[in-house]
Amino acid sequence: MKLNAPTQNFWWIAVILGVLGVVAQFVAVPFVSVYSFWFVTVGFVLLTLSTVLKGM
């Protein structure tokens, strides 16, 4: 399996989702705190997909 570097846009989106999820776990953010686990999960999945699939 050949891995590719993710594009900068997808990388930043994944980082922002992950950071929002971690911060929301410790600080009460109205919508994000309820779904903080899912924000981190979606960030990691997006990062993984953009590494495995070409062009993302």
Image (tube, rainbow, N blue to C red):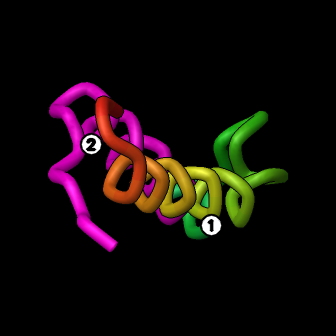
Give how far across and how far down residue 37 sits, in percent.
71, 65
| Horizontal side of residue 18 vs 7, given as left or right | right
Secondary structure predominantly adopted by residues drawn in magenta: helix
Asked whether residue 32 is in view, the answer is yes
Q: CA distance from mark 2 to mark 1?
A: 21 Å
Q: Residues within 10 Å of mark 1 (few under 14, many from 20)?
A: some
Out of 29 and 10, give the one closest to the viewer: 10
Toward the viewer: 49 or 12?
A: 49
The secondary element bearing badge 1 is classed as: helix
Would residue 27 be visible to someone looking at this image? no
Q: Nearer the viewer, residue 14 or 27?
A: 14
Occupied quadrant, residue 21: bottom right
Q: Is residue 5 left or right of residue 31?
A: left
Instruction: Pinpoint residue 43: horizontal percent, then vertical percent.
Output: 51, 52
Give the residue type that dot 2 points to. Answer: Trp
Point out the stretch of residues depicted in magenta.
1-22
Position of 24 with respect to 2 (left or right) is right
Vertical arrangement, residue 10 with respect to residue 53, above or below: above
In magenta segment, residue 44: no
Q: Is residue 15 magenta?
A: yes
Q: What residue appears at the point 32 percent right and 40 percent down from the top-left corner? A: 54
Q: Residue at x 16, y 32 (%)?
A: 8
Q: Which mark is residue 11?
A: 2
- Tell which circle, 2 or 1, labels the residue nearer the N-terminal end: 2
* Quadrant location, the N terminus: bottom left
**Residue located beneath label 1 in the image:** 25
Q: In the picture shown, does residue 25 fall above or below 13?
A: below
Outermost residue on the right side: it is 34
